[in-house]
Image (tube, rainbow, N blue to C red):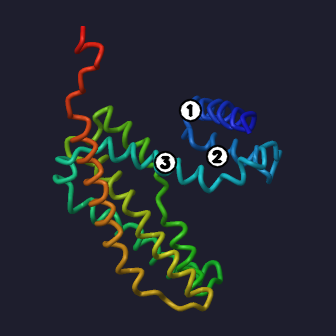
């Protein structure tokens, strides 16, 4: 398992550096290494790594979203509140509508299959958006108007919106019908996540601000 992790990290970083030299996004090299080392090509990864792939992906997503949350300023979010809300569902809605209109004509798919394909293709990858927006914020590009903050906040909420739509469209494609209650869970999920994150952040902040107790050996000295 450790050997497989070493292959992934070393080869991934080397391919990312090569793509950077070629003026390409670093993630292209990392994806190419993942495909090359995986079971579809060289198949050099240990089976335990593949069995833990779902947990590793979830852990990576949590780390990326934590980085996004810690990089955002509440004042910036208040300033770009309305555009950020529109960014969370409007681009994905237009993409899905485009697939609904064009996929049956160009690809010969049914409307339901086109909706499933549109929900898949409309998803925004936080692994691509968050590091790039953080870099733009560090370099000061567009921060006066809050553009990187708006894109990063909208992309985080966009995933929730698209995942619910994908689950609903997939159920329709399998003959289960549309779960209209799932659409109502979108704002509920977002608000619950915001409330839980705010409560956890406030609790950690209050705990870390408490003065450290004096050690016994210092008090008796």
Q: Dot 2, crowdedness within 10 Å: few (<14), some or many (≥20)?
A: few
- Position of residue 53 measured from the top left corner of the image (x, y, whole percent): 65, 53
| Picture residue at 37% right of the left edge, 62% below the top | 157
- Position of residue 6 measured from the top left corner of the image (x, y, whole percent): 70, 32
| For residue 114, side relative to residue 197 (left or right) | right
Numbered disc in front, either 2 or 1: 2
**Nearest to N terminus: mark 3 or mark 1:** 1
Per the rendering, the mark at residue 20 is 1
Q: For the view shown, which residue lies furthest in the front direction? A: 220
Give the quadrant of residue 172: bottom right
Q: Dot 1, crowdedness within 10 Å: few (<14), some or many (≥20)?
A: some
- The CA distance from mark 3 to mark 2 is 12 Å
- Position of residue 97 measured from the top left corner of the image (x, y, whole percent): 45, 78
Q: Dot 3, crowdedness within 10 Å: few (<14), some or many (≥20)?
A: few
- The CA distance from mark 2 to mark 1 is 14 Å
- Please tell me whether residue 135 is drawn above or below residue 217 in the rendered image: below
Per the rendering, the mark at residue 128 is 3
**Nearest to N terminus: mark 3 or mark 2:** 2
Q: Is there a contact, CB below 8 Å, between mark 3 and mark 1?
A: no
Q: Would you name the residue on which mark 2 appears?
A: 31
| For residue 1, side relative to residue 208 (left or right) | right
- Secondary structure of residue under mark 1: helix
Q: Quadrant of the C terminus?
A: top left
| Picture residue at 46% right of the left edge, 74% below the top | 164
- Secondary structure of residue under mark 2: helix
């Amino acid at each position: 398992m450790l050997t497989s992790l070493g292959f992934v990290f070393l080869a991934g970083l080397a391919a990312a550096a090569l793509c950077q030299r070629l003026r390409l996004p670093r993630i292209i090299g990392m994806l190419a290494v993942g495909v090359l080392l995986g079971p579809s090509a060289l198949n050099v990864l240990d089976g335990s790594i593949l069995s833990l792939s779902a947990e590793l992906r979830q852990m990576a997503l949590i780390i990326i979203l934590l980085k996004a949350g810690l990089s955002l300023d509440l004042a910036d979010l208040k300033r770009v509140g309305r555009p950020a809300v529109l960014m969370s569902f409007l681009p994905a809605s237009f993409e899905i509508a485009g697939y609904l209109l064009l996929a049956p004509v160009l690809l010969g798919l049914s409307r339901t299959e086109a909706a499933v394909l549109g929900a898949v293709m409309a998803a925004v990858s936080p692994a691509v958006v968050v590091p790039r927006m953080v870099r733009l914020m560090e370099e000061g590009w567009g921060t006066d108007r809050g553009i990187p903050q708006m894109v990063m906040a909208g992309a985080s909420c966009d995933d929730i919106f698209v995942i619910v739509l994908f689950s609903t469209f997939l159920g329709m494609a399998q003959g289960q019908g549309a779960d209209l209650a799932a659409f109502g869970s979108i704002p509920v999920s977002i608000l619950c996540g915001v409330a839980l994150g705010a409560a956890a952040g406030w609790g950690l902040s209050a705990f870390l601000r408490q003065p450290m107790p004096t050690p016994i050996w210092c008090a008796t000295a």
